[in-house]
């Protein structure tokens, strides 16, 4: 049985696009909203998640 490798890191997370969106969202989000991680999802299928920067 061969294992498929799915993790593909294009830029060190969080990438430039994700940082910009997270910073912009702070302006419109309640201070009580706690973002534990800076992940901006572009797509997801099963357990595979792709962020806005291509990771």
Image: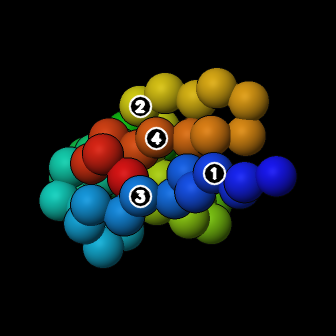
**Residue 43 vs residue 21, the one in the foreground:** 43
Residue 10 on image: x %, y %: 27, 61
Residue 15 on image: x %, y %: 25, 62
Res. 37 visible in picture: yes
Q: Nearer the viewer, mark 2 or mark 4?
A: 4
The answer for how far apart the CA atoms under marks 4 and 3 are is: 9 Å
The answer for how far apart the CA atoms under marks 3 and 1 are is: 12 Å
Q: Quadrant of residue 51?
A: top left
The answer for how far apart the CA atoms under marks 2 and 1 are is: 22 Å
Residue 11 on image: x %, y %: 25, 66
* Secondary structure found at label 3: loop
Residue at image coords 56%, 41%: 49
The residue that disc 1 covers is 4
The answer for how far apart the CA atoms under marks 2 and 4 are is: 6 Å
Which circle's residue, 2 or 4, is located before the other in the chain?
2
Q: Nearer the viewer, mark 3 or mark 2?
A: 3
Q: Outermost residue, bottom direction?
A: 12
The residue that disc 2 covers is 42
Numbered disc total: 4
Q: Are marks 3 and 1 in contact (CB under 8 Å)?
A: no
Residue 26 on image: x %, y %: 37, 52
The answer for how far apart the CA atoms under marks 3 and 2 are is: 14 Å
**Residue 15 vs residue 45, the one in the foreground:** 45
- Of the numbered discs in the image, which one, if any, rests on residue 50? 4
Q: Residues within 10 Å of mark 3 (few under 14, many from 20)?
A: few
- Of the numbered discs in the image, which one, if any, rests on residue 8? 3
Q: Outermost residue, front direction?
A: 1
**Residue 6 vs residue 4, the one in the foreground:** 4
Which circle's residue, 3 or 2, is located before the other in the chain?
3
């Amino acid at each position: 049985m061969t294992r498929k490798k799915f993790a593909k890191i294009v830029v060190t997370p969080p990438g430039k696009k994700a940082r910009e969106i997270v910073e912009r969202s702070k302006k419109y989000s309640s201070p009580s909203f706690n973002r534990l991680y800076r992940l901006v999802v572009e797509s997801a299928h099963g357990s595979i998640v792709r962020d806005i920067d291509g990771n």
